[in-house]
Amino acid sequence: MAQRSYRDPLHNIISLDESSPQDRLLIDLIDSAEFQRLRRIRQLGLAMFTYQGAEHSRFTHSLGVMHLTSRALGQLALTSDLREEERTIARAAALVHDLGHGPFSHLIEKIFRFKHEDWTRRIIGDESTEVNQILTNYDRKLPEKLDDVYSHTGSPAFISQLVSSQLDCDRMDYLLRDSLMTGVKYGVFDLEWVLHTLRADPDSGRIYVESRGLHAVEEYLQARYYMFRQVYLHRTLRSAEAVLTSALRRAAQISAEDGKSPAANLDEVLDKMLTGRAVTTFEYLELDDSNLIFCLKKWTAHRDPILSDLARRFINRRLFKAIDLELGPDQMQPFIEGASKIISDLGFDPRYYMIVDRAEDIPYYAYYAPGEADPKGLIYVETNSPARRIREISEISEVVRAMRGFRIERACVPTTAYAEVRRFYYDLTSRLGAGRGAN
């Protein structure tokens, strides 16, 4: 029996049976040009500036999500009826769920204001893509069925929940994988016990966890919370993002002023995006991390001093320094104005060299908040006392109820301005009686 095996640093060996039509579908999807592109997109964006091992790709993560989905389906099949078609839809949807990511994953979405989920659905639905052709050759309706999974309109509900919910295979894989590759332990939780206690409610079709799995899910939610606090929102990582964001904003400003972007003659797709023109599916799929790095390397010699400086800072890791802020709403504006003047007096344009970084651009994924999350994606746990019921986890878990959101505000400034801006912040907080000061 021919096997296609992928050696994975997290899950060890992921095997697919080449003689199985269902596994053959997955192999063909993996071999498609659109999926192979994910090798060239880093899973953690700019985290390698902080954690040198964080060079892993969306390709490896997507394989991991498919693998965990297959394992979860195998567990659910022990206690629930599960048709082969449902398994195929779930596994395929898990495998290709990240096709729409752009360079450096989530970062580029914030700059150009799009959602990778929309691009994933567009790529799957576009008849010109290899992925679409592979799916339709297997089942003419399969692209639509995958779209139903992503929009949570398909049935049974647990298929969508395995792919996208508060307790999904996507999060389970990236927490453990990112923890492994960054060398931290914050993202570790008892994956085996979570999977072992997964069940599907025959009445609602949704996933729940047996009562004996409660503590493992609590650990998973805590792991997610601390990975955001300590890794995904790390001050150096976010400072690197501030430099890259400023460089692209400056490139867009030059485009608006000159009618020609700095990416002209370097990268046609990035040129279009900087000038606000629409790109086709084919053009979008031409973008990966290497496009952006190539342009930034070329921009280090650009005639515009701001763009060339920002590009050099990024390429050579001469990043901004971050000052943690604790200011009330009425105190933030005086700080921004004072810090901007300091930066301007030092010869920097504050539009690009005084960046306020706020954690608000991170969605609710950072922590479990039942009141803010989509009800379709909530976590449910079985209780046996006083009677068997399936309840939302925060109703029965003190650990989950105690988890709260967090606020992060930082000023990201050039190193040469750091000491003076930090001193100004201390003086301001002392004078206005704000917070605990800068770190």
Image (cartoon, rainbow, N blue to C red):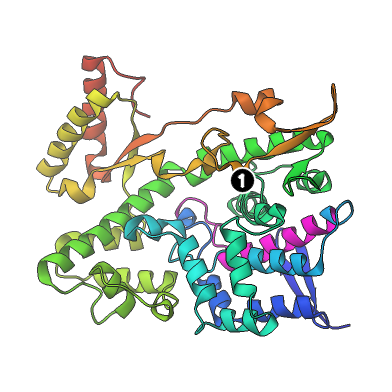
Residue located beneath label 1 in the image: 376
Q: Is residue 324 above or below residue 167?
A: above
Report the magenta residues as a range: 49-75
Residue 314: which quarter of the image? bottom left
Q: Is residue 165 above or below residue 372?
A: below
Residue 358: x and y, percent?
36, 39
Residue 89: which quarter of the image? bottom right
Residue 430 left/right relative to 363 = left
Query: Going 26% across and 68% down the picture, which residue do you hit?
Result: 274
Q: Main secondary structure of the magenta part?
A: helix
Q: Quadrant of the C terminus?
A: top left
Q: Residues within 10 Å of mark 1 (few under 14, many from 20)?
A: some
Query: Going 16% across and 42% down the picture, which residue do you hit?
Result: 343
Query: Going 68% across and 62% down the picture, which residue do you hit?
Result: 64
Does the magenta portion include 369? no
Residue 88: x and y, percent?
74, 69
